[in-house]
Amino acid sequence: MSGERRCDWLWIGVAIAARVVTVLILRSHLVPNSTYEHGEIAANLVAGRGFSTHFLGADGPTSQQAPVYPVIVAGFYALLGSGTPKALLALELGQSLLGGWLVAATIGLARAVTLRRSWVPRAAGAIVALSPTLVYAATHVQVALLAATLLSTMLAAGYRAGRTLRVHDAIVAGFWLGLVTLTDPILALGGVGVAWAIVNESGGIRLAARSLALVVLAAMIVVAPWVARNYRVHGEFVFVKSTFGYAFWQGNCALSAGTDKVVRSSVDRALAAQTGDPMDLRRLNNTLWAARHEAGYLDDVALSADDYETLRAVPEPERSRILFRRAVADLRREPSRYFRLCARRFRYFWLFDETNPKTRNFIYRGSVIALAVAAFIGLVAAPRALRRRLAPTCATAVLISLFHTFTIVSARFHIPIEPLMAVWAAAGLARFDLPRGSAAGRNVPVGNSPVS
């Protein structure tokens, strides 16, 4: 095994170990009411009630969540009991292993972009292995970590498909695009990055046309069964999730601060309840969870019993449309408020969601700011040719951030782009990879060997 590969495995091992230790220290699997909709859907799957949940006043088959992650949670529930601490601990330990995949995917993406510049993949892998926000994500029953892993894997596959123009590689990239869409449909915007990478790597749209068509076809084949299921369940076309209107209402109704959470003074009191050693991580984690539960959801204060009665009487997609219309009506009464909310959400997305108690922690804020600064410096310092090759990853992150800017934002929505930011942060090291007297600093192709 080459030294490069040994370094890869080192960071994969470090990532897994860091997450396992964090899971065992924080013991989030003992926190009550920590699984939200994913856990409820998973429990219903195990109980034989199908992909269903209680949503906006009604019980029944749902498209409130994309299918991949709840099905994974259901697998752990089926083995170890629905919602039991054993099942949640096993799930979190499984997500620790997923952290190793995330490091491998990030390293693969960095190599695909830089064509084996040694320092960039290593540094990107190290950042992802030890980033506090990515490590902490393994302790949550939340789709963000899986989504981040699949997004990086998909983009790496896109670069490879463009470079080889092989049918197999294009189909693989399309498969990952489809799986990403069934995990978090918003991240399907990364398909733009995949297409851009294929065109850039192949040398032009004419050469890339067949590969692009195969990517789209493969992705459609992966997504089609779920879309057909949604049509059968709801009686109309629903692309993966039915909740765009609901999410838009949460982020833009008259009582919204731009997110799905309630701004309450009681949250400050819950956070102030932290006593003892400030570095007692388990106590700190329990305090943050208590404050998060105290914040609750906007639905708790913005929807009345009459609202739920109205929503219960209509199909699930129509519930979202009703709430979307309400949000639009609120914004029409004060049009400038939407622009203020968008500006706030843009700031929340790239830094931290002020309405989420967990983002008020100095560890979280310090790591987010450090990654943002490092990513900016890395992009500025990277050779011009490398910045051009990074453009598909930048476009992916920008599109995702704009979607959340215009609709709704939350801290978890930032997780999928953090591995991309790690690659940007490491990109500045590319200037140090070429030996003295070589083409360093000139506008030449970055690297000269293919990615395996």
Image (cartoon, helix red, strand yellow):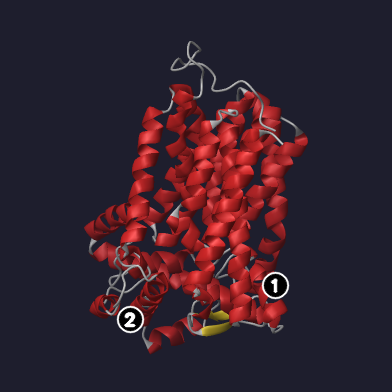
Q: Position of residue 260 (x, y in %)?
A: 38, 69
Q: Position of residue 416 (x, y in %)?
A: 50, 52
- Residue nearest the observer in this picture, 301 or 229: 301
Q: Secondary structure at mark 1?
A: helix
Going by the image, does 148 lie left or right of 172? left
> Label 2 amino acid?
Val
Residue receiving disc 2: 301
- Residue nearest the observer in this picture, 385 or 368: 368
Residue receiving disc 1: 75
- Residue nearest the observer in this picture, 15 or 231: 15
The residue lying at 35 percent from left, 59 percent from top is 363
The quarter of the picture where the N terminus appears is top right
The residue lying at 28 percent from left, 70 percent from top is 254
In front of the other: label 2 or label 1? 1
Compared to 352, does 206 lie above or below?
Answer: above
Q: Quadrant of residue 83?
A: bottom right
The quarter of the picture where the C terminus appears is top right
Res. 67 mark: none
The residue lying at 36 percent from left, 30 percent from top is 380
> Label 1 amino acid?
Gly
Marks 2,1: beta carbons within 8 A: no
Q: Quadrant of residue 231?
A: bottom right
Compared to 285, does 12 lie above or below?
Answer: above
